[in-house]
Amino acid sequence: MKRCASVTLLSALIATSGAYSQELEEVVVSARKVEENLQDVPISVTAFDSAQLVERGLDDVFDVAKFTPGFSFEKLNRYGTQGGGSRPVIRGMSQILGEPNASIFVDGLQYNDSILSFPFDIVERVEVIKGPQAALFGRATFAGAINLVTKKGSNEFQNRIFTRVADYSEYEVGFLSRGPIIEDKLFYTANVRWYDFGGMYRNSLDNQRIGDESSVNFDSSLEYRPNDVFNMRFTLGIGRDDDGAAALTLQDRFANNCFLDVARQYFCGEVAETPPSEQNLDLFGGDIGMDKDSTRLALQLEYDLPNFTIVSNTGYFGADQTYGYDVDLTADSTRFGGTFNRIAVSDREELSTEFMLRSNNDSGLRWLAGVYYYRSRRDFREDRLNGSTVDQGEARVDNIALFGSLSYDFTDRLTGGLELRYAEDEIGNFNPAARPDVPLFENTYDSFTPRITLDYQLNDDTMLYGSLARGNKPGFINANPLLPPEFLFADEEEADNIEIGAKNTFADGRIVFNVAAYYIDWTNQQLTGQAFLFDGRPASVVVNAGETTVKGLEMDFTAALSDHWTVGGGLNWTDATFDEFDDAEQAQFTGGDPSVAGNHTPNAPEFQNNLFVRYGFDIGSGWTGFVRGDYAYTSRKFAQIFNEAHTGSQDLLNLRVGFQNGNWDLALFVDNALDDLSPSTVIRFVDFENFLPTGDSQRTSAFVRAFQYPLADRRQWGLTASYSF
């Protein structure tokens, strides 16, 4: 009934809005390893092309998530080592520690690092693919995948100079060039970008700016197409990030207002919006914040034969990073002899390769078969300013998989699909310095992840579809060498997903309206628990949480109401609740009952809604203009499984006015026009400065709960300009 009412309302708006516009542009995605019209894909996908990204001012994945129903992502992830609440969350399938439940890909290659300084100037399309994607995308796509498709060369030369200037000392300059070296055969793409941001907040101890960022990127590609049969593309990306201290704050124990008689106390309700940030920045000298160098290489080969195509996709990613940070976020820098002033040092290398055969005929039976290999090595240690070091060794992942798919047209209207993947994950930690007797801990996990789809073309305007998919997430190693052996491994997770939906195109292509409902049966969820190190100190570890049920509904629409007016938006409701999970701290809160059954998963909003309105107009002399508003609502996110401390809801409104002709593209903008400073995430933490005495039967620890979170982006004004030639 709701769907019919919405379509009727939109049709009525079109009928009363004057002259019809041309139909909406067709959106092409590669969510199933082949390029398809978005409306023909029997799974839920939200896609943004390069024109939409530019006009809406979506500069990174964090911005994309704000306007994607069912997808959230935290900007804190830019800092990599401390992003406890920053991993991608799709359809409520969240976690606090451990590997993400959804992964980001660049041209189909996994990108296991902070993506927020990736230059969107070279992005042709962003695809947010919802639901398990293991069958075709592989590991770490338990809840979904985010695929960035980069721009390719062509016979048409394109040169574009871009700049952005905004308050809080934000400046960006970029240059993109692409075109033919040899017409019809050899093409190039090159992009260089410089970015600098002064930060929106100041440290309360010394008035220094925090949250400042600086990046330099160079990206290029060469494509060789000697004929209609063979295609080769080589890609190189180099990035340099030099950021200051993160804009983080701590709500200390004095705000705690509930469970005051238990060992650590707690806070119930919405955290304060902008308490001051207290960080001992001068202790670090030039080592505060993040310093990272990264390299990305990729080689893609495609060879067309009469009945099938051979595809190879191989990539390398490497990053060296140091991150100096004040762990406790308190004014006292001498407590514990500097153990909470740390420099995290990491060195990551990843290699992946995929070899695939794909049918290229138009018959009723289409197929795909492939083999995949992935290798990851990451060294990680923390150098503390008191002279000590905690070396967590080298984390190792080796994954090999076989995969394939079949699609068959039973009739002109009914199509069925089957996707399969068998994978083996060998996960280990090599740490001879900390574990001389047993330097390597490792475990092997295997998985079988099918997906079945069925779609029915009801008429020329409507496709109905359903899918049944199994998701699997490999186990996890808690690498701290001071942990007892029984806490080293967390078991793998599994989830059975059911999705039904409809994709609709009405009014001669001027309305697109899609809706999907989903149900997820999730077992062995990996979440945070508590263990004690050999020296008696508590530590957070990844444990298995029992069972969780997720159910939800999402929709999105776009409507060209007239030659001038376009509206669109989306809605997501997700109910992700624990069925079974016992926690010792919950038992303290309740006086004995450890169960959190019925509580929502942390760091996942129940509602995400967005709406945009755009008015386009002619100015004359070849110039056009537009005015648009983009609004997004996100409901509260809980800090932890107890569903007590939370972010509060957020109302985001971005406004833009732009002017364009054949060469120039100018825009004035105000982001977060309502200046809503609700934090996007909250992390349960500890107040290391303000102790409470121990000694009674209830208080066994002097460390009392506090809550850490990133300070939200303030209202910001600015302008963008680009010149194409």
Image (cartoon, rainbow, N blue to C red):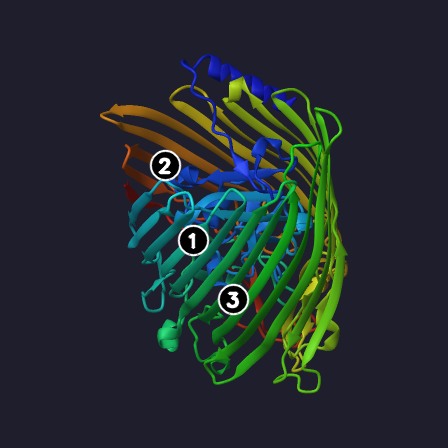
Please name the residue that numbered disc 2 is placed on: 655
The type of residue carrying mark 1 is: Leu
Q: Which residue is mark 1?
A: 222
Q: Nearer the viewer, mark 2 or mark 1?
A: 1
The picture quadrant where one finds residue 283 is bottom left
Q: Mark 2 falls on what kind of element?
A: strand
* Residue 348 horizontal side relative to residue 495, left or right: left
Q: Residue at (73%, 70%) from the top-left corner?
A: 443
Residue at image mark 3: 81
Q: Quadrant of the N terminus?
A: top right
Q: Nearer the viewer, mark 3 or mark 1?
A: 1
Q: As drawn, is 716 to the left or to the right of 698? A: left
**Total marks in image:** 3
Is any part of residue 499 visible from this angle? Answer: yes
Q: Residue at x 63, y 23 (%)?
A: 462
Where does the image place residue 509, in percent across and percent down from the top left? 52, 22
Q: Which class describes the residues within 10 Å of circle 3: few (<14), some (14-19), or many (20+)?
A: many
